[in-house]
Structures are given as structure tokens and as C-alpha cells.
Amino acid sequence: MTARLLVATTNVGKQREFRRLLAQLPAELVMPEDIGLELEVPEPHATYAENAAAKAVAYCRASGLLAVADDSGIEVAALDWGPGVRSARWGSGSGNQADQLIEKLRDVGDRRARMECALAVATPGEPGPAVEIFEGTVEGSIALERRGRGGFGYDPIFLVPGGHTAAELPESDKDRISHRGRAVMAATPRLLELLGH
Ligand code: IMP
């Protein structure tokens, strides 16, 4: 019987990427909605790793399945390397976050930025799930205007080495260099082990 691996996110952009990134694993990928799981997991922590662990553990505990979750964010030099772990909540709350970030940096020369991802793998067990963390980073900069239709979130304004935004890249190119792609690559040997290979 194929082992099941729960992708512990309801973010559609992340789900699409995880479906691609985890496709080669000997596992049936399961999304929370596939098993009727609706969880609200707070993300109050100061690090990506702690937030990712909280999500993976909550979903693993609720489902009894091996679970992966990520917490990610964008870090901008001109914002003292913020908003970082608070990226999902950054901005005024109304309007697109990528557009707001472009506006905020309108007259700023130093446009260095990076995207960070912590991927938590939670394994069912007693007295509770065991969790391991894998990380990935991609260095880049903030574009002067949005470009590209792919990806999600900050992708249309995040320039990667080579001059394209992450939203302009073919999906396989984003996966190869992205913070999430790199974190999944780092986790893959362990996931294979956990899946019995
Ligand atoms: P969280 O990991 O769910 O807390 O979301 C982090 C924030 O970073 C959200 O605003 C996402 O839209 C954004 N984000 C996460 N990953 C990516 C990515 O791969 N590209 C662009 N934006 C991202």
C-alpha cells in the first residue's frame, strides 16, 4: 500500500508547488481538504522553523499521517531584513502585498532581498509527533515593477539571479532555485527514509 503524505497547507499557491516538488516521492500526496481536515494553526513564533513545526505537528496529530508544512517569507535589506516571519501579515491589509512593497521601495536604491523557507516534517509517534526542520534560501532583489503571471505572493516582484522575476520563470526553473524547492531538496533523503526507501 502506498504511504500517504499530508501537505499541511491550505495556501493554493503552496499546494501547487508541493504537488510538483514532492511528485517523485513514493507516496500518495494528500491535501487537508482531501481528508476533511480544517485546522486553524496560529503562527505566533519568532522563527520560521517554530511556525512550520507548529503547523506540521498540528496536522500530523489530527490526521495520524506523516505531514510536511512550511513557513516562509521575504526579507528585504531596506526594511532591516523584514518583514521576514511576518510576511503573510505585512502591509496595510487592503490591496496587494507585492504592490505595496514596490510602492514602499519606490525611491530606495538598495533593493537586495531574499526568500526563506523552513520545511517541517512531522512523523506520528508516542507521546506525540517527532518533528525535523529543513531550510532553503534564495537570494535576489526587489524589482521596480511587477512582472510575470506565474507563482504567487511576492513572486511578481522578486528578481532572481538572471534578471527574471520568480513569476516569469517556468515552474520547473522556480522549483530548482526557490527557497521552497531547496528546502524540499534538503528534506528528500529523510522523507525517502521515512517512507521506507
Ligand atoms: P506563510 O508561510 O504562510 O506564513 O506565508 C508567508 C508569506 O510569504 C505570504 O505572504 C506568502 O504569499 C509569501 N510567500 C511564501 N512563499 C512564497 C513564494 O514562493 N513566492 C512568493 N511569495 C511567497
Image (spheres, grey):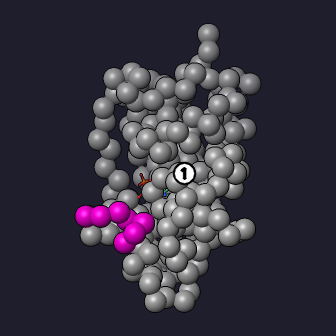
Residue type of the residue flagged with mark 1: Gly
Asked whether 11 or 121 is in front, the reply is: 11
The residue under the point 46% across, 89% down is: 107
Q: How many marks?
A: 1
Where disc 1 sits, the SS reads loop
- Tell me the quadrant of the picture where the C terminus can be found: top right
Q: Position of residue 20 (x, y in %)?
A: 62, 37
Q: Is residue 17 visible?
A: yes
Query: In this rendering, is residue 14 above or below 33?
Result: below
Q: Callout 1 environment at 10 Å: few (<14), some (14 to 19), or many (20+)?
A: some
Quarter of the figure with the N terminus: top right
Is 4 on the left-hand or right-hand side of 197? left
Occupied quadrant, residue 106:
bottom left
Does residue 48 show up magenta in the picture?
no
Residue 81 in percent (x, y) is at 49, 77
State whether residue 131 appears in this view: no
The relative height of residue 177 versus residue 64 in the rendered view (above or below) is: below
Q: Residue at x 49, y 88 (%)?
A: 108
Q: The magenta stretch spans which residues? A: 93-100
Q: Is residue 81 above or below residue 184?
A: below
Q: Which residue is mark 1?
A: 150
